[in-house]
Amino acid sequence: MPGADDLSHLLDDEEQSQFSLRDPAAIAQVLRGLLEARALISASLVPGGYACPTALLAVHDDGTLVLDGNRDEAMNQRMAAASRLVCSAQLDLVPIRFRLATPQRIVHEDYVAFVTPWPEALLRLQRRETYRLPCSPTAQATLHTGSAAHAPDPDAPGLRVLDISGGGVALAVPDSAQHDFQPEARVAPCLLRLGEAPPMPVALEVAYIARHDVRGVPHWRAGCRFIDLPAALEQQVMQYIFQIERQRNARLRRGG
């Protein structure tokens, strides 16, 4: 997992994406949604990298908001000393990210709290099932399949991942293997390798398979959904997507 400074650097690029909100009215709507849902917010303190769970207590029309304090006084002192907070939350399964500047300690309804200005930008991704990242040779991802008798071999050639989301993958399937990827078929066990990270175990169900010919050679594209993907592995998938988007945004800014 990246530290707070890494997440802050990622947000520099993510805030330039099509999912970034900058209109104050739109930002207020999301903040009030988090408030009404009593959503847990994971706040990473910069500098220091400490992780502090918190929640919104109020969203004011004057452009400020109030965050809950901590039972640990040492953590409250670290939060008061932070120059900014890198915040992550979920609203209706949609990942939300934003940064807050210079939290000021106050007393709110007899408890420790912190007041800070609204974020200048807020990243609200699409629902995890529809937010898809096309995979290119510079963002290689592969799927290694096994069978009931044999575990998947991560060192053997795998199937190329064409795109990926928090909900599933699209695969390039050779003609010789297309019979294993019929709709509603279960593909397990599997290992999903994202870039240079260690492969992660996943189970898939085929949603569709479509044929297209390239120079007369048949190719198959199989869309598969994850089955019971643990939250920790879903977080790894989303972090991979964030990382690749950051790299692509950086190349675009350099003109490459």
Image (spheres, grey):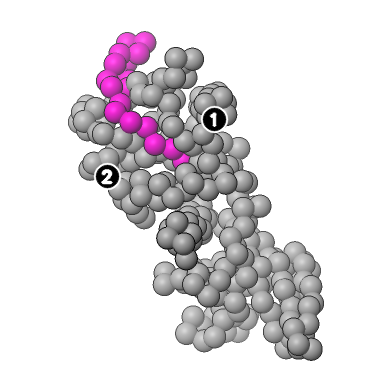
Q: Residue at x 36, y 10 (%)?
A: 109
- Extreme residue toward the top, this view: 109
Q: Is residue 177 left or right of residue 48?
A: right
Task: Based on the picture, tell me whether residue 168 belongs to the magenta stretch.
Answer: no
Residue type at numbered disc 2? Gly
| Residue 94 placement (x, y as % from top left) | 58, 42
Identify whether 198 is placed above or below 235: below
Question: Badge 2, how many Cα within 10 Å: few under 14, some, many 20+?
Answer: some
Q: Residue at x 34, y 36 (%)?
A: 85
Res. 23 mark: 1
Residue type at numbered disc 1? Asp
Of labels 2 and 1, the one closer to you = 1
Question: Badge 1, how many Cα within 10 Å: few under 14, some, many 20+?
Answer: few
| Residue 181 placement (x, y as % from top left) | 73, 75
Observer able to see residue 22: yes
- Extreme residue toward the front, this view: 255
| Residue 165 placement (x, y as % from top left) | 60, 58
Q: Residue at x 49, y 46 (%)?
A: 16
Observer able to see residue 179: no
Judging depth in this view, the residue of 78 and 151 nearest the camera is: 78
Identify whether 165 is placed above or below 220: above
Question: Which residue is identified by label 2?
Answer: 49
- Per the rendered image, the range of residues in magenta is 97-114
